[in-house]
Image (cartoon, rainbow, N blue to C red):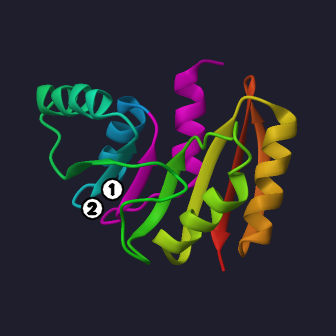
Amino acid sequence: MSAGDVEVALLEAARLEPGDDVLVLGGQSLALGAHERVGDGWVYVVRSQVDELEELLGEAHAVGASGVAYLVGETPVLPLPDDAVAAAVGRIATEDGALVSAVEELARVLAFGGRASFAEPDVAAGEELARAFAAAGFEQVEAAQTGEEVVVSGRLG
């Protein structure tokens, strides 16, 4: 399975619907895939580096994607208000032990009943992410192997 297969699995696990506003922590193909599914909804792409955002913005303009906002930030402190999005997809950096606070921040920006799906390349990290989701109030938490990655998803209860 390819990285594209993981992105499709992330989008399907988030159960995106037309009109949803979505937070994307990841690459342009994931953002454009989310945009295709939500139509008039907004896609908020958050990256920590301005040059990455400029590159993503150029790619979005090249394919005529509107309704995509590019924001500088990181998962532990997302640049969105409370209850801002119906879904969140992508990858969370877990290197520095900030996983629990990152998932709590995701819970803050998700509306009640919001869906989240994130990929982890390591099975143990995927299990840790699933535990963090459950501890932050997510329900129906699932971890599914997709190729060489684990896709963890849940709904904010």
> Residue drawn at (42%, 36%), measured in percent from left and top?
30
Q: Quadrant of the N terminus?
A: top right
User: 76 or 85, which is in the foreground?
Assistant: 76
Which residue occupies 55% across, 63% down? Answer: 106
Residue type (three-letter) at the residue carrying disc 2? Gly
Instruction: Give residue 157's quadrant in the image.
Output: bottom right
Q: Identity of the amino acid at label 1?
A: Val
Q: CA distance from mark 2 to mark 1?
A: 5 Å
Q: Are marks 2 and 1 in contact (CB under 8 Å)?
A: yes
Secondary element at image label 1: helix
Q: Which mark is residue 38?
A: 1
Neighbor class of circle 2 (other Cα within 10 Å; few <14, some 14-19, many 20+) is many
Q: Which residue does the image show at 20% across and 34% down from the upper left? A: 57
Quarter where residue 86 is shown: bottom left
Q: Relative to the observer, which residue lies in front, 71 or 44? A: 71
Q: Residues within 10 Å of mark 1 (few under 14, many from 20)?
A: some
Residue 144 in percent (x, y) is at 78, 42
- Left or right: residue 147 compared with residue 18: right
- Which residue has dot 2 on it? 41
Q: Is residue 4 left or right of residue 133?
A: left
Image position of 135 (left or right of 86) = right
Judge whether residue 14 is colored magenta: yes
Q: Say above or below: 94 vs 6.
A: below
Q: Is residue 77 above or below residue 97?
A: below
Residue 43 colored in magenta in the image: no
**Where is residue 93 shown, x and y percent of the image?**
62, 39
Region of the chain picked out in magenta, as a range: 1-26
Please, is residue 13 above or below residue 111 in the view?
above
Residue projecting furthest to the top: 2
